[in-house]
Amino acid sequence: MQDAVTEHIEASPESVWWLVADVTQTHRYSEETFEARWMDGASGPAVGTRFKGHVKRNGKGPTYWSVCRITACEPGREFGFEVVVGDRSINNWHYRFEPAGQGTDVTESFRLTPSAATRIYWALAGWARGKTNRRNMRATLKKIKAIAESEG
């Protein structure tokens, strides 16, 4: 119920981190989230800060808003958030930024929060969703790479 993908980007860890951590820019690179907004008066990333992501599942639908809470926020090193329903975490997304040569190795990962419901879901549809997540993580990182390298 987890996976990770890594991409090398010819940009500094700090510049790539800021691109990812400013969730209002997610629409520029995400395969499913086409809009995101800070919540509760927040204007930037910090551990515990919430935001809403407007998602078009599988790029086709259904379309819905997800509430997320930042779980890791260390500029130039890591950024993570959990998707929550009520106060319960159902999925965790994480980015790690490692200096490599003149650039950065960026790893995007997801991990479903273990529960009876997620185990059943993963057993029934996990193969398809896992395949979609891997494909989307690769595409997302390629778009982040293109943006980060062009903005320099």
Image (cartoon, rainbow, N blue to C red):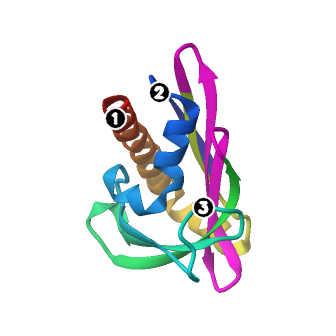
Q: Is residue 85 magenta?
A: yes
Q: Which residue is mark 3?
A: 45
Inspect the image, locate mark 1, and give the three-letter code of the amino acid beneath it: Glu
10 Å crowding of disc 2: few (<14), some (14-19), many (20+): many
Image vertical order of residue 152 relative to residue 31, above or below:
above
Residue 99, image x and y in percent?
62, 24
SS at circle 2 = loop
* Residue 92 shown left or right of residue 31 in the figure: right
Q: Is residue 120 magenta?
A: no
Image vertical order of residue 40 relative to residue 143, above or below:
below
Dot 2 and dot 1 residues touching (CB under 8 Å): yes
Residue 63, image x and y in percent?
33, 76
10 Å crowding of disc 1: few (<14), some (14-19), many (20+): few
Q: Which residue is mark 1?
A: 151
Spatial CA distance of label 1 from label 3 is 21 Å
Q: Main secondary structure of the magenta part?
A: strand
SS at circle 3 = loop
- Which residue is at a point 39% across and 35% down the rendered structure image? 148
Dot 3 and dot 2 residues touching (CB under 8 Å): no
Spatial CA distance of label 2 from label 1 is 9 Å
Which range of residues does the magenta coloring cover?
75-104
Question: Between residues 126 and 6, which one lies in front from this camera angle?
Answer: 6
Specify the farthest residue to the left.
Answer: 60
* Residue 89 shown left or right of residue 147 in the figure: right
Q: Which residue is mark 2?
A: 11
Inspect the image, locate mark 2, and give the three-letter code of the amino acid beneath it: Ala
Quarter of the picture containing the N terminus is: bottom right
